Image: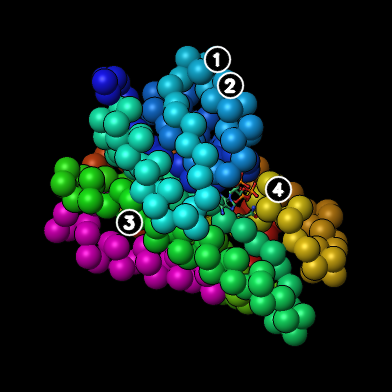
Amino acid sequence: MPSDGGRVALITGASSGIGRAAAKGLAATGWRVGLLARRKDRLDDLAEDIRGAGGECVVLPCDVTDRDGVRRAAETLIDTYGHIHALVNNAGIMPLSPLAAGRVDDWERMVDVNIKGVLFGIAAVLPHMLERRSGHVVNVGSVAGRRPFPGATVYSATKFAVRSISAGMHLELSASDGIRVTDIEPGVVRTELMDHIPDQDARRSFEERWADRRPLEAEDVAEAIRFVLEAPPHVNVNELLVRPTDQPT
Ligand SMILES: NC(=O)c1ccc[n+]([C@@H]2O[C@H](COP(=O)([O-])OP(=O)(O)OC[C@H]3O[C@@H](n4cnc5c(N)ncnc54)[C@H](OP(=O)(O)O)[C@@H]3O)[C@@H](O)[C@H]2O)c1
């Protein structure tokens, strides 16, 4: 039986970094949140934190490259709370390397998670949002979706795609169907994202460039996500570029 209460958000990549911070931040302001990622143990820990602080959530272990799994996760959330008001399409990976290193498997994984995963999230919630003629999709893109960086060509391409998908969604769905869309474009954020860079040279070069600079914290981006979601219904923040003060490009 769906419970009455605050608005409902499905958050992908909720097991760490920006997604985790967004889930905590939204739950703290009364949103009921669906926590989606692959690592169930992490999601269970987060759920305990959220519930301990008086919030409401559902753990939805899932791989965003599993189209049916994402659809089922959205259905579970709708069955539990009656609605999905927002999707935070945040799950992403960034195994950086120069093209010349030829890490084609990494290129394919980035396309699968960062582009197809975003599309599968949209596909899972769109019928419900169209029916309600209301909803908000926040896609977590990147500053890399505005310009490529050396060693980040494929990652940038996936984030250009996220920006393009966001712009297309706005054209097709905002005025006609009441669905808002935002592309949040963070600069460098202190999360686990860099820990998974398998190319040692790419990782070292990134760490050296940031040794004396202050990146954003996950909570800074989570606050930006909350800001766009809680804007009045007639306000659609389509793009939000949030860089550390220490990041010139
Ligand atoms: N950190 C930055 O500097 C930065 C800058 C700009 C944009 N971003 C973007 O911000 C988003 C979040 O990244 P983050 O920095 O918070 O990194 P993070 O701490 O590594 O978090 C990534 C999240 O994505 C999830 N994920 C990865 N692959 C998945 C899959 N196949 N299915 C489901 N979930 C998956 C991970 O969970 P599981 O491993 O448990 O599945 C994790 O929860 C990404 O889209 C990233 O591109 C980050």
Furthest toward the bottom, the residue is 100
Q: Which one is in front in this view, the residue at disc 1 or the one at disc 3?
A: 3
Q: Which residue is mark 2?
A: 49
Task: Residue at 33% x, 51% y: name it.
Answer: 124
Q: Amino acid at mark 4?
A: Glu
Asked if disc 1 and disc 2 are in contact, CB closer than 8 Å, the reply is yes
Quadrant where the N terminus sits is: top left
The picture quadrant where one finds residue 183 is bottom left
Q: CA distance from mark 3 to mark 2?
A: 30 Å
Q: Earlier in the sequence, mark 2 or mark 4?
A: 2
Q: Amino acid at mark 2?
A: Asp
Q: CA distance from mark 4 to mark 1?
A: 25 Å
Q: CA distance from mark 2 to mark 4?
A: 20 Å
Q: Which residues are magenta?
A: 156-180
Magenta: main secondary structure equals helix
Q: Which residue is mark 3?
A: 123
Q: Position of residue 99 (x, y in %)?
A: 70, 82
Q: Residues within 10 Å of mark 2 (few under 14, many from 20)?
A: few
Q: Position of residue 198 (x, y in %)?
A: 78, 63
Kindly identify which numbered label has been placed on residue 192. 4
